[in-house]
Every structure is written in structure tokens, then in C-alpha cells.
Image (cartoon, helix red, strand yellow):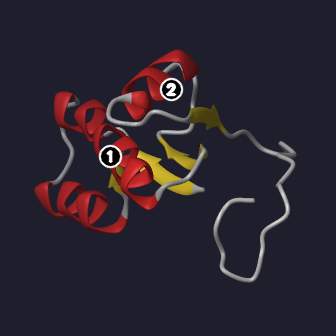
Amino acid sequence: MHEVIDLDFYRRGSGYDPALLQHFAEAHTDVSEVGRIAERSGVATLVLNHLVPADTFLVPESSWRRRAQKGFSGRVVVGSDLARIPLRSWGLSGRRS
């Protein structure tokens, strides 16, 4: 599970303070980077949560999924409020079983 931001959305917008953009970049992972992180981590499923911006009219779910999938060979789930995602059992090693 990873919280993500679409920094391109904010960079394309007008009137955003550079300090705010810097904060966004430091406090969140850009959606274009999260797939590579998940791949290196060896996870089977990447769940995106705390989407910024959260409004799917501004950034559609398909865009989140497509951009997060780059560099990741597993399944991408775009989380939503109150979504339930079943987890597999994990051994003591913390690896997938």
C-alpha cells in the first residue's frame, strides 16, 4: 500500500506556490515512481491510497493505474474510501506465501 500524488497535475496547474509543490514532492511518492518501488520490493499487488488529487474527475482511475503500472509486473489496485482488499497469509519471514 502506498500513498501517491500526480505531481504533473499540479505542475501543469497555475498559481501553485513553489513551496507547496516542493512539500508535495517531499511528502508523497509521485505515481510515475511507485511502480518501480513496488517491483523492487517484490510485492504481488500494489494498492494506491491517499490519492492527491483525490477527485477522479481531475485524474481518472485509469490514469492512476496506467502510470503506476509502469515498471511493475504485478497487479495495481486504485484504492477508494471504504474499499476492502483481502490479504494473503504471511509467514514469519514476511515474504509472500
**Where is mark 2, residue-wise?**
65
Q: Secondary structure at mark 1?
A: helix
Identify which residue is drawn at 41% across, 36% down.
72
Q: Nearer the viewer, residue 11 or 71?
A: 71
In the image, is 48 to the left or to the right of 20? right
Give the quarter of the figure containing the C terminus.
bottom right
Residue 36, label in figure: 1
Identify which residue is drawn at 47% across, 39% down.
53
Q: How many marks?
A: 2
Q: Earlier in the sequence, mark 1 or mark 2?
A: 1
Proximity of marks 1 and 2: CB atoms separated by less than 8 Å: no
Type of amino acid under label 1: Arg
Q: Residues within 10 Å of mark 1 (few under 14, many from 20)?
A: some
| Residue 57 against residue 19 in the figure, above or below | above
| Residue 44 against residue 87 in the figure, above or below | above
Type of amino acid under label 2: Arg
**Image location (x, y in percent) of residue 34:** 38, 47
Identify which residue is drawn at 78% across, 68% down.
90
